[in-house]
Amino acid sequence: MSCGGHEHSEFASPLACSIWRAAQTQQLARVKEIIEKGTQSANSKDESGYSALHYAARTGNNSIVNYLISKNAQVNVATPGGDTPLHRAAYMGHESTCEILLNHKADPNKKNSDNQTPLHRAEANNKPQILELLIKYNA
C-alpha cells in the first residue's frame, strides 16, 4: 500500500495514511490530497473520536484549520469527552487558532464531560492571552 508516495510500512499503515495523522503532523498537502480524493472527509473521526480539526487546533496549524473549515469541518464537533477543537487550542495557548475558530462560530461556552469550557482549559494551563480572547467572545 502506498501513502503519499511512501512504500515503507510505517507510512503505508491506515493510521499513517489518515487525515488525522496528516493534521497531527502538520502536512497540509496530505490533508488536501485525502479530502480531494474522497478517502476521508473534513468531519471524519478516528477511533478515539477526534476529528482532523481537533488535531490541527491542538498543534496550532492555522493553514490546516482554515482548510478544514473551508471544507465544512464542524467547528463545535466534540470528542467522547466533550472537548471541541476550541478546548484543545485554548489549552495549548494557540491564540490565532482560537480566534479563527471563534470567528467561525465555535462556542466559547461549550462544556466538556468535566464541566469545563475552553476558558477553564486555558486557565488550567496558565494561558492568560487566551482567557482575554475568550472573554472578548463572551465566554
Image (cartoon, helix red, strand yellow):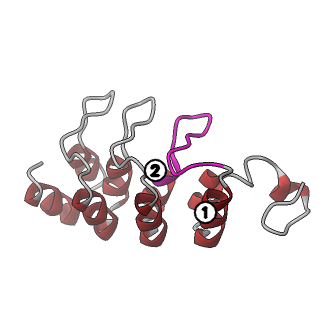
Magenta span: 40-53
The answer to whether residue 25 is seen in the rendering is no
Amino acid type indicated by mark 2: His
Taking the magenta stretch, the answer to whether it contains residue 28 is no
- Camera-nearest residue between 130 and 62: 62
Which circle marks residue 31 in the picture? Answer: 1
In the displayed structure, 124 sits above or below 29; it is above
Quarter of the figure that contains the N terminus: bottom right
Q: Which mark's residue is nearer the viewer, 2 or 1? A: 1
Amino acid type indicated by mark 1: Val
Q: Residues within 10 Å of mark 2 (few under 14, many from 20)?
A: many
x and y, in percent, of residue 107 in the image? 22, 45
In the displayed structure, 79 sits above or below 32; it is above
Image position of 46 (left or right of 62): right
Q: Residue at x 63, y 48 (%)?
A: 40
Q: Residue at x 74, y 54 (%)?
A: 16
> Disc 2 vs disc 1: Cβ atoms closer than 8 Å?
no
The quadrant in which residue 28 appears is bottom right
The quadrant in which residue 82 appears is top left
Q: Specify the principal SS of the magenta part.
A: loop
- Camera-nearest residue between 29 and 124: 29
Q: Residue at x 23, y 38 (%)?
A: 110
Q: Secondary structure at mark 2?
A: helix
Image position of 9 (left or right of 126): right
Q: Residues within 10 Å of mark 1 (few under 14, many from 20)?
A: many
Q: Residue at x 12, y 48 (%)?
A: 139
Taking the magenta stretch, the answer to whether it contains residue 45 is yes
Q: Earlier in the sequence, mark 2 or mark 1?
A: 1
- The residue to which callout 2 is attached is 54
Image position of 47 (left or right of 106): right
Q: Secondary structure at mark 1?
A: helix
In the displayed structure, 128 sits above or below 123; it is below
